[in-house]
């Protein structure tokens, strides 16, 4: 009887481990060391704004490109980055390690960008989707590019087709994002310990007196930490050890002559023999020699400013210090030739490579955050203890009274009321049992995916340095754990209907309903974003890939889980169900379903309120967030208090002689999502009041709707599971008495 359950658990663990393996990342695993005079190139990311939350491609704006052409950084692309609109590309900003450089031109081909056309100033459009490296090589003077940023045909010129006006981007406070050695650039001082937060990127420009100016001069300050090449030699040692181990294995099978006949170079074999004679440790010396000073990048800062320079003239060394001695700013207007320049400074820092992200992961209100978290934990534990004590004492007293009535005789039972009279109706199948099974199955899937993802993030496997890893892991886990959804739904269907007949329909509903709602919201939003040319719109190929994964992987796994659940024996109820249902009396005010619904979600929402504020602030206002340990802990505490409240409300409902606790317990458990939805609307009006336009608001509401849907199914399942266990336990105790 226990073997099917063990098989289900084993398969669940296997699939979860496979999903985790695809998202494996531990901060501090891949340190990079650079020799002096080595040349590295910064990468540019998408343009973002906290007032629109709609990202755009960097090179859709009038920026200079590298002479070798624009190429995408393929090692940073994954499903999460595509959905989030993250696109890392090469840039014309090159740095020589530990070499201070001033007045470098970022437009090496022409020395400037321009002259700005009417389209450059007003309307910028997305590049064609079939852009392949090298994407565009703009020859002077402004000849048609290989992939020109041309306006769309006149018949397609509508308000929803335009990306943004260039001046509007400055008005919406769009920010330029760059990356160097996987570290984002910031306009703030990373060494200033008094700063409460660090925001990535810097603003594109500014508006003053009705005129718009672009920040065309960048003063970079790169923080480095000196090393002696120990990381590089250790990595090379691992590679050499692997080569030696492979050669030793082959040597046991082949002689030297056979190795030479097999095509192995004699030099490599001689080197292996020499290494083996030295005890198997042949560490190759790096180019700088053993003990040479190398540098690791631990910070990336920038001080941008706007400087009007004359195209074709020598570049003057000007420091952006905010003084009045600076030349006039570079205005954005038609016919202007913009000269993009930059300075490079290097600063030796005591920051270790393993802790270089600490400066980026600051959050506003850090002390208040910690105090509020600890306060919430104490309140939750105290309330959970009180609720548990009340329930245990009340139920125990009811059982003792019921037992005394059974001993005294049935004549005294006529005046008795409460949950004990529902013995023949407590486990009566609810209305719409198929829908009930589908909701619970989807809730189990969502709950396991959330807990597994948060656990991996808490353990450090999902670092902010691995962009898109959190979202990618969530999607992979959701797909692979579809079999859990199917198994849970079919198992509950069998418990309610006392048979597994019709389980195929239950599995089909589970595979299509909740994922279908998510895909519907995602599709509508994607179509709206597609017409704007934003990077937030998923390309058609990726979109249909997601659909194919849904139907070719997720749906079959749901049916596999459902089929495995049919192999399980049906759960036996402790009491029998009467054929004729009992009439339900009108509920008192304290047991009214509406009152219980709104009351059940208050305490769980209060548990997560503080952490929800910080999480949403980081998500929508551009801060880094990495306190997943607190989120995981708050999630567990929310589940505990939700169970306590669900049991208490179910007990009150049963005492009112209402046996329709199946759906009511699910609704009450998911009621916390109602308060989260209200909070999301309030957050939109208070903290995100600067969101400009219908589309940014639609984007925000769409993603929050998906989050509330997942929270509703997960917490509803928790409430139902706690209520089911409670009802089963008390009526099993009645039967024993």
Image (tube, rainbow, N blue to C red):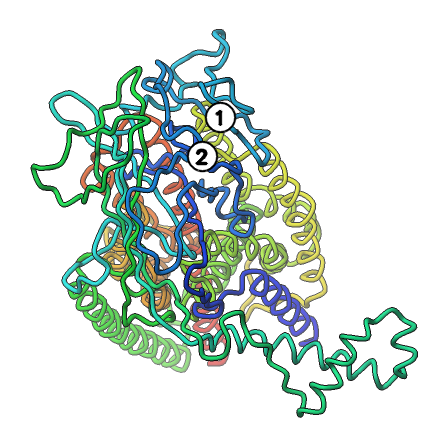
Question: With 398 as the anchor, is 666 left or right in this view?
Answer: right
- The percent coordinates of residue 20 (x first, y second) are 56, 64
Q: Secondary structure at mark 1?
A: loop
Q: Secondary structure at mark 2?
A: loop
Question: With 24 as the anchor, is 592 left or right in this view?
Answer: left
- Residue ranking furthest to the front: 314
Q: Nearer the viewer, residue 382 or 223?
A: 223
Q: Is residue 592 visible?
A: no
Q: CA distance from mark 2 to mark 1?
A: 8 Å
Q: Which mark is residue 418?
A: none
Mark 2 or 1 closer to N-term? 2
Residue at image coords 49%, 67%: 30
Residue at image coords 51%, 58%: 444
- The percent coordinates of residue 244 (x first, y second) are 71, 81
Q: Which mark is residue 65?
A: 2
- Residue ranking furthest to the top: 155
Q: Are marks 2 and 1 in contact (CB under 8 Å)?
A: yes
- The percent coordinates of residue 534 (x first, y second) are 43, 30
Q: Determine crowd level at label 1: few under 14, some 14-19, many 20+ residues with C-alpha closer than 10 A.
A: many
Which residue position holds label 1? 138
């Amino acid at each position: 009887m226990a073997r099917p359950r063990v098989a289900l658990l084993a398969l669940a663990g296997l699939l979860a481990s496979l999903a985790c393996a695809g998202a494996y990342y531990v901060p501090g695993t891949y340190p990079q060391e650079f020799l002096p005079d080595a040349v590295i190139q910064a990468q540019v990311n998408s343009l973002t704004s906290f007032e629109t939350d709609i990202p755009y491609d960097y090179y859709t704006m009038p920026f200079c490109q590298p002479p070798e052409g624009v190429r995408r950084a393929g090692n940073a692309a994954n499903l999460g980055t595509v959905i989030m609109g993250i696109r890392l590309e090469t840039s014309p900003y090159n740095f020589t390690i530990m070499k201070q450089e001033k007045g470098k031109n970022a437009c090496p081909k022409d020395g400037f960008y321009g002259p700005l056309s009417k389209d450059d100033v007003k309307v910028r459009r997305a590049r064609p989707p079939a852009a392949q490296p090298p994407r565009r090589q703009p020859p002077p003077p402004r000849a048609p590019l290989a992939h020109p940023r041309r306006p769309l045909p006149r018949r397609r010129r509508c308000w929803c087709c335009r990306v943004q006006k260039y001046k509007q981007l400055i008005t919406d406070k769009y920010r330029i994002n760059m990356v160097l050695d996987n570290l984002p650039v910031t306009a703030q001082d990373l060494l200033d310990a008094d700063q409460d937060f660090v925001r990535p990127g810097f603003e594109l420009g500014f508006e003053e007196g009705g005129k718009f100016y672009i920040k065309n001069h960048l003063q970079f300050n790169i923080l480095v930490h000196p090393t002696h090449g120990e990381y590089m030699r250790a990595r090379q040692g691992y590679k050499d050890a692997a080569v030696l181990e492979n050669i030793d294995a082959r040597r046991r099978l082949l002689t030297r002559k056979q190795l030479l006949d097999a095509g192995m170079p004699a030099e490599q074999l001689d080197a292996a023999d020499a290494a083996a004679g030295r005890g198997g440790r042949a560490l190759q010396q790096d180019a700088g020699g053993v003990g040479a000073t190398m540098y690791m990048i631990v910070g990336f800062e920038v001080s941008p400013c706007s400087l009007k320079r004359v195209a074709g003239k020598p570049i003057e060394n000007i420091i952006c210090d905010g003084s009045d001695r600076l030349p006039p700013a570079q205005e954005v207007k038609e016919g202007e030739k913009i000269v993009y320049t930059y300075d490079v400074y290097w600063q030796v820092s005591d920051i270790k490579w393993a802790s270089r992200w600490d400066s980026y992961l600051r959050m506003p209100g850090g002390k208040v955050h910690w105090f509020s978290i600890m306060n919430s934990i104490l309140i939750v534990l105290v309330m959970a203890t009180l609720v548990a004590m009340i329930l245990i004492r009340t139920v125990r007293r009811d059982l003792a009274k019921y037992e005394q009535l059974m001993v005294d005789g049935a004549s005294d039972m006529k005046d008795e009321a409460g949950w004990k009279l529902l013995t023949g109706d407590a486990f009566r199948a609810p209305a719409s049992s198929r829908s009930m099974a589908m909701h619970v199955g989807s809730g189990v899937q969502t709950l396991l995916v959330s807990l597994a993802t948060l656990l991996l993030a808490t353990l450090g496997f999902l670092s902010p340095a691995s962009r898109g890893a959190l979202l990618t892991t969530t999607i992979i886990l959701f797909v692979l754990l579809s079999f859990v959804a199917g198994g849970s739904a079919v198992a509950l269907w069998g418990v309610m209907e006392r048979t597994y007949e019709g389980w195929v329909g239950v599995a089909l509903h589970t595979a299509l309903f909740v994922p279908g709602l998510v895909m519907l919201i995602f599709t509508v939003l994607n179509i709206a974003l597609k017409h704007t040319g934003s990077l937030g719109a998923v390309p058609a190929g990726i979109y249909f890939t997601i659909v194919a994964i849904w139907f070719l992987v997720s749906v079959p796994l749901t049916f596999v889980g459902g089929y495995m659940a049919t192999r399980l024996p049906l759960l036996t109820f402790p009491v029998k169900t009467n054929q004729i249902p009992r009439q339900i009396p009108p509920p008192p005010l304290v047991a009214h379903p509406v009152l219980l619904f709104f009351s059940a979600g208050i305490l769980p929402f209060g548990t997560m309120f503080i952490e929800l504020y910080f999480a949403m602030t980081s998500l929508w206002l551009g801060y880094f967030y990495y306190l997943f340990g607190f989120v995981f802990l708050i999630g567990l505490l929310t589940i505990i208090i939700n169970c306590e409240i669900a049991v208490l409300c179910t007990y009150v409902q049963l005492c009112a002689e209402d046996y329709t606790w199946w759906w009511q317990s699910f609704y009450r458990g998911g009621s916390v999502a109602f308060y989260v939805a209200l909070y999301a609307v309030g957050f939109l009006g208070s903290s995100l009041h600067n969101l400009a336009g219908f589309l940014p608001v639609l984007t925000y509401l769409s993603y929050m709707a998906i989050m509330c849907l997942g929270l509703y199914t997960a917490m509803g399942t928790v409430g139902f599971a706690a209520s089911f266990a409670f009802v089963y336990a008390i009526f099993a105790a009645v039967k024993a008495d």
